Every structure is written in C-alpha cells, then in structure tokens.
Image (spheres, grey):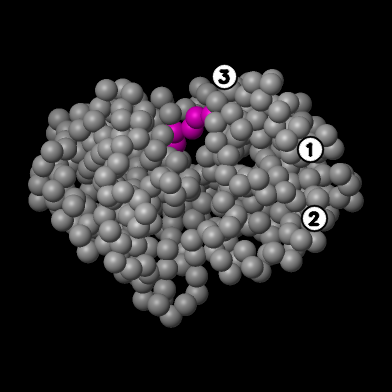
C-alpha cells in the first residue's frame, strides 16, 4: 500500500506528534508499505526532499508563521502532486491545512484518515483570537469530509469538544510506543555521567512548554524536600529555543537557578540513553495542565523500563496509569497533591511496578501498525 502521511512539523522537530508519526511511518515501512511524509520546511536549512529509514520526506517552504502554525501557500499544490501516486492520505490534526487535505482527497477519490492528536489552545493575543476560530473551523470541515477519525483513547474522544461531535466516525487506536531495553552497562554509565548516586531521582521528559506544567513540579519539589531532602529532578528534552515558548523559559529561569543542584537539564535523549534515564528514575512525572496533552507517550516508555509514572488527571493522559496500575493520578495544577503522589510512589515503588511484557501487551508500535493497516485496507477496499 502507498500511504501519504501529512503533518505540519516532522523530524528533526521533536514533539509527541512527530515521534508518533515517525514511529508509525517506520513501522509501516517495515511491514512492507511505501510511506511518504508531507510536511513543512520549518527550518530553511532542511532539504526539500529527504529519506529516513525508508520513509520519503517532502518538505514545503514556509511563507510565514501565525503563532505556532506555519503558512505554506504551495502546500495544496504539493499534496495534489502526491495524491495520484498514493492509495490513502493520513493527516494529523490540528493543522491549518486539514480541511484542504480532506477536500483534495475527496476530489482525487482517495480515502482519508485524520488522527486527532490534541485540542488546540493558543496564548491570549489579538491575532490568536482571530486565528483560533479559523483553525477550529478548518478542523471541523476536515472531520465532516474525512472518511475516518482516529483518537488515542476513548476517554479523550468523549471529553474533547472536537472529537465528541464526531464519535460515530471515531476509531480508537493506541499510540505507537517503543523504547529500547536498557542494559545494565548503559544504566550504570548513565548514572555515573549524571552523578545519580543520591536518591531519589524524579524524571520529566518533555519540551519546556507552557502546557507541560513545569512550574507545578517546581512547587511540588519544594514540598517533596521536606520528606525527601535529596530528591532531584532530571528534565529531559528541549529546554532552549523552544518554538513559541521563549517567554515561558525566561519566566521560569530564576526558579531553575534557585533549584540549583536539585534540577538538571539533560537536553534531548534517544536510544539507550533515554532508556537508561527511565531506568535510573524512581518515578517519572507528567504534570500537564490542559487538553493540548492527550496521552503522554513518555509515561508508557517509562513503564516499559520499569519506572512508575505520576500524571495529571486529564482525559487521555490518565488512561495509561489507570489501565496499567503503574503509578498515580493527581489533580490538575495541584502541587501539594502532586508532591504527595510522587512521595507515595517513591516510598512504595514495588507496589506500582509491572513487567515490560505486561505493558507491551497494551501498547507497542506493532499494535498501532496492525490497527492502522486494517483500517487503511478497509477504507481502500470500500
């Protein structure tokens, strides 16, 4: 099958959405399919065409940005050029071009799938008050025209103002989750590199972005130190020059300085290093604040490496913890409750830990690929 995946940002940009599509695209290639990714040339240094792990990448130049969105006048033309040579189009929302993609798919008599990754919430600003309804309108038009919508969880679909309007079209497919098995040597080397002899270690894997609730963890850390004075946070992910989050980083910088040795930024990690980070943590945390977070792939990665997770009580985000029993759910934005949950998991860790095999029966890239293959084949046949 020839599959066209479409999203606004792709590698090397790092977010849960880009990781999702990258894993799915590679998995589909391994399963014998031809996959093309159509995306933006958000950085002018990136080539217009590229190939990674058998996945063909086509990038469209960006004319300008509106908030975090990219405006690409040639995007529709690029999609129309690629559509005839593909069997199905799979777009990832939210994005400005969702409606145009669905319309073009219908015109070229190609089935279309839309995976809705999260609700969109733009920062308060005059321009964003204009942009927000435009994006929402385009996404709703895309949902009406598309053949199928996909959500990560039924919990998120039921609670999303967007997805809940189209439940008859929604299919739930668990996200693709994969993480290397950390080796004893890699775990020891990571602990030595980051001087992790003092315990406990609290991990947070995310971009430094407003919706992630980093300030809630900072508040919780002050409370945790009353019980666990040596507790330390390792923040893994992009924390400098995050698109649209520069002011947020400047606002939090004095607090990072105050936290000093109890807060360490590692930058992005991959492969054995990321797996070893999870294995070295006593608990990982996802204190997200709003529905721009719909799941939290990092929670399941952490569980696969033997480390429980504490997360906010957000639709979708809470599902992996509730389903596996491997962690705690805390009220949104409640630092004392978050601190209590973290301390409980650290002090009673053995109660929360489940095997990698147990978690892998619920979440994996192979499961996601099989589910999407079945959906694609059904839509192409019909």
Q: Mark number for residue 260?
A: 2
- Residue 88 picture location, percent across and down: 20, 38
- Residue 310 picture location, percent across and down: 67, 42
- Residue 137 picture location, percent across and down: 30, 65
First to last magenta residue range: 175-179
Res. 280 image quadrant: top right
Residue 28 is covered by the magenta coloring = no
Q: Mark number for residue 78?
A: none
**Mark 1 and mark 2: span between their CA atoms?**
14 Å
Q: Earlier in the sequence, mark 2 or mark 3?
A: 2
Q: Is residue 198 above or below residue 76?
A: above
Q: Which residue is mark 1?
A: 195
Residue reaching furthest to the bottom: 126
The residue shown at (55%, 31%) is 271
The residue shown at (23%, 48%) is 146
- Please say whether residue 52 is visible from this viewpoint: yes
Q: Is residue 339 above or below residue 322?
A: below
Q: Is residue 48 left or right of residue 341?
A: left
Can you tell which of label 2 and label 3 is closer to the viewer?
A: 2
Quarter of the image containing the C terminus? top left
Q: Is residue 99 left or right of residue 261?
A: left
Instruction: For the residues labelled 1 and 2, say whether their Cβ atoms are less than 8 Å apart.
Output: no
| Secondary structure of the residue carrying numbered label 1 | loop
Q: Which residue is mark 3?
A: 357
Q: Is residue 297 above or below residue 92?
A: above
Res. 70 image quadrant: bottom left
Q: Is residue 6 left or right of residue 297?
A: left
| Secondary structure of the residue carrying numbered label 2 | helix
């Amino acid at each position: 099958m020839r599959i066209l995946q479409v999203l606004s940002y792709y590698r090397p940009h790092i977010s849960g959405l880009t990781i999702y599509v990258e894993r799915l695209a590679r998995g589909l290639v391994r399963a014998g399919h031809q996959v093309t990714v159509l995306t933006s040339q958000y950085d002018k240094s990136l080539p217009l065409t590229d190939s990674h792990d058998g996945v063909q990448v086509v990038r469209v130049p960006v004319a300008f940005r509106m908030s975090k969105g990219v405006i690409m006048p040639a995007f529709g033309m690029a999609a129309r050029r690629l559509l005839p040579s593909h069997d199905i189009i799979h777009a990832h929302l939210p994005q400005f071009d969702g409606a145009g993609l669905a319309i073009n798919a219908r015109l070229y008599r190609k089935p279309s799938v839309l995976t809705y990754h999260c609700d969109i919430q733009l920062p308060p600003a005059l321009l964003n008050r204009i942009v927000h309804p435009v994006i929402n309108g385009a996404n709703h038009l895309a949902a009406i025209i598309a053949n199928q919508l996909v959500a990560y969880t039924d919990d998120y679909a039921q609670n999303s103002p967007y997805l809940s309007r189209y439940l008859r079209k929604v299919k739930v497919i668990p996200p693709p989750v994969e993480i290397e098995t950390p080796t004893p040597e890699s775990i020891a080397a990571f602990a030595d590199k980051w001087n992790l002899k003092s315990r406990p270690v609290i991990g947070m894997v995310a971009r430094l972005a407003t919706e992630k609730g980093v300030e809630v963890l900072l508040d919780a850390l002050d409370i945790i130190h009353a019980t666990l004075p040596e507790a330390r946070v390792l923040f893994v992910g992009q924390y400098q020059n995050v698109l649209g989050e520069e002011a947020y980083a400047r606002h939090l910088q004095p607090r990072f300085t105050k936290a000093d040795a109890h807060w360490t930024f590692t930058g992005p990690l991959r492969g054995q290093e990321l797996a070893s980070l999870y294995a070295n943590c006593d608990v990982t945390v996802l204190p997200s604040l709003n529905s721009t977070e719909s799941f939290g792939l990092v929670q399941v990665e952490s569980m696969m490496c033997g480390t429980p997770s504490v997360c906010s009580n957000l639709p979708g985000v809470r599902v992996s913890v509730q389903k596996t029993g491997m962690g705690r759910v805390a009220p949104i934005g409640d630092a004392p409750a978050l601190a209590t949950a973290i301390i409980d998991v650290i002090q009673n860790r053995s109660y929360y830990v489940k095997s990698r095999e147990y978690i892998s029966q619920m979440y994996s890239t192979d499961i996601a690929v099989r589910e999407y293959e079945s959906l694609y084949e059904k839509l192409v046949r019909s």
